[in-house]
Every structure is written in structure tokens, then in C-alpha cells.
Image (cartoon, grey):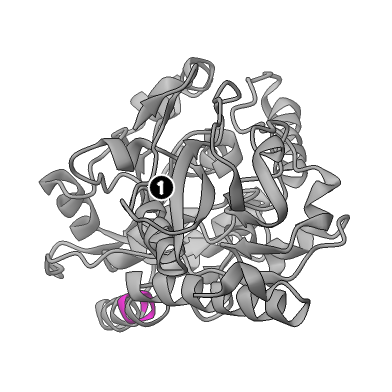
Amino acid sequence: MRAGLGKNICVNVNQSCYERNCLLIYITAPFIQRAVSEVHQNMWQVKELAKIIGDCQYNVDVVDYNDPHVKLKHRYDMVIGLIPRDIDIYSQNLNPGAIRIAYLTSSNIAFTNAQEKKRLQELYVRRGVELIPRRQGGEISREIESFDAAMFIGNEYNLKTYGSFKMPPVYYIRNNGYAFDFETDWGKKSPRKFLFFASGGQVHKGLDLLLELFAKPDFPGELFICSSFEREEDFCKEYRKELFETCNIHAIGFVDIESTEFKNIVDECAYMIMPSCAEATAGSVLTAMSAGLIPIVSRECGYDEGDVILLDDCRPETIERFVVRYSHKNAAWLKEKSTAVKHTVGTKYSRKNYIQSVKDAFDCIITEREKNGGAEFFKK
């Protein structure tokens, strides 16, 4: 590993000796840390992705996707990562005919930016307050149209947000859940208890809508909030009463999913609820599902009918109708549905599913390149 002018560059992470080089533009922390954190699926996935690229006989260098100051010295036969965005650190270091693969982990960023702004405007209409956008990102350029392929963690609904582009071949990649080793305490679980489990961007994720719902007088339900709301001072100021002075709303904050605290919360809650405005196979949903929570989520979260309970839309009255309906389910139904949810994670969204989907994508990309006369890049 050598230091650039910005974040570190992790060089030849597989310690291989192949003739070809690949630049992986994603995150570097998992290659620097001694133990891989479980805080997010991508911490594990990026290391597996690097291994799979190595199995295709490439030496792999890894740089951080949001570091514009990295100085590259190698020339690369393949580049893959969270590109093309407004940061270009790679184009001058590609060999002729190099393979370019976009690794997409969200809906089209232009769409997500617009969706968050729309939610903030709706909040302004409801409460007369302007909050800071938290999920705005650099948009993907039309350069993606000239890429060889795209790997996409999302479903067909999410992919439609890229409709303004003439996309290269797109290969769906499975996000993964977890194999928690704790058993559900069915004596504690209640259909009236809902978990909001998310990261940053509370309005983007729909927490404002849930707070306004659960704060209604005598509302028949409890909301547990495990998110990074504390980092958003303007949000906390506006929703101080709902967050901290409402008896059926439990503002917990960030929770380690390997902790006893997380186990205790999922023992009590029956559902995970997230009316987000833009995602792509949201990882927090899979984390909750892995613990047996029944997901009630927006279609934008990137799941198909049958895997989750899909909200018809994210209007306040719609969310209320769903919460009230499912808060009356009996224990037998909860247990049956929870078991089915965990089975879905184990069969469709396991770590093995992620690995196999990435391998299948590379196999198809390699086959396609060979058909188009680029077989020299794939000779053993």
C-alpha cells in the first residue's frame, strides 16, 4: 500500500503476479482494517469483488471512489467501480482496449437527487421548514454509454431510473444479508412495534413521515429508530418533540448489528419499515430481514413483490393504512411470515448469492468481449 495525495491506494491487494492489471474504484477501508466491519455490506463485498477479479487473472489495485487527488502510476487493462462520475482519475492510465465496467449500487443519482429535493419540498409544504439536503451526489455522465458493461445492485424498477441513458449490457448483482446466530424470542415480539433502520438522510429515508404518523394522539403503535438522525441537527431541532418527547417513539440512534442492544430491539419489533424515496436493493432492509423482521418498504427500496410488503405509495395516509393493518396480525401469522422472510434472505440474498452473481456477470462480460474480438485480454 502506498499513500497518494488524498486517501490511500491499496496496491495489488491479492498479492498476485499476473500480466494484467485492474483498477477497482470503490472503498479502501476494508483493505486497511485488520477486521472487516459489518457496519455495511459493501465492507465485505469489496474484498470479495477484488478476489473474483483476481480469479480472472488480474492484479487488483483499489482506490477510494471519492478521492480526486489519487495519482496513479500503473496502466490498467480493466477498470471497474463507482464510475463514471464527476471525478476522473483513471482515463489517462488505461491501456488501449481496456475493459470499463460501471459498478452501480443505487438508482440513477440524478433521480435520487431529485427525489430528495421533492421530499424536502413536501416537508416544507407540511411544516414550513427548510432542511438541508443530505443525500445529494455527483451525477453519472453520458460516458457510461460507452462502457463495456454495468453491474447493478438493484432490480428492474430501479434500473428504469437510468432510462435517459443508452445503457451498456447490465448484469444484476445480488446484495447480501447476514446469517445471525440468535434465535427469535417470540414471547417478546409485538405486531404493534416497528423498526426504522437506516443510515443518513432522514427525510430521504422517510423518517419524517413516520414521526408525524406515530406521534398522532393515541396512535396504536410504537416506533424504534435506529439511524444516524443525531448527525442531522436541523432535523432533530424540527422533530425534537416527536423524537424525544413522545412515549411511543424510541429514538435510539446508531446500533451495532452484532450487539445485544440490536438483538433486544428485533426481539420486540415485528416489522422493519422504510418509506424511502430512492434506493437500490437497500442493505438496511436486508439486515432487518436477516433478523426475521417483516419489511414494509417503498417500491424504491429495490425489492420485488413477494420478497417484502410493498407500500402502494409513500403518502402519509397510505403509510398509516399499512401500519394499522399489519399491527393487528396475530402471533401465528407473524411467525410464519418472519420464517419466510429469513428463508428469502438465505436463498436469494446470501453471501453465496452475491459471489455467484458477480462471477456470472464476469463470465458474460468476458464471453461478450471474446465475441467482439478482444480475446487477447482474457487468454490464460
Residue at the (66%, 31%) spot, across then down: 136
Estimate the x, y position of residue 362 in percent, counting from the top left: 55, 72
Q: Crowdedness of circle 1 by 10 Å Cα count: few (<14), some, many (20+)?
A: many
Decide whether the magenta segment is chiefly helix, strand or loop.
Answer: helix
* Residue 329 appears in the figure: yes
Residue placed most toward the observer, 43 or 99: 99
* Residue 249 appears in the figure: no
Q: How many marks?
A: 1
Q: Secondary structure beneath disc 1?
A: strand
Residue at the (72%, 50%) spot, across then down: 108
**Residue 295 sits in which quadrant?**
bottom left
Residue placed most toward the observer, 336 or 214: 336
Residue placed most toward the observer, 4 or 246: 4
Estimate the x, y position of residue 359 in percent, counting from the top left: 48, 74
Residue 372 in the figure: left or right of residue 281: right
Q: Which residues are magenta?
A: 341-345
Estimate the x, y position of residue 262 in percent, counting from the top left: 20, 48
Question: Which residue is denoted by mark 1 in the rendering?
Answer: 196
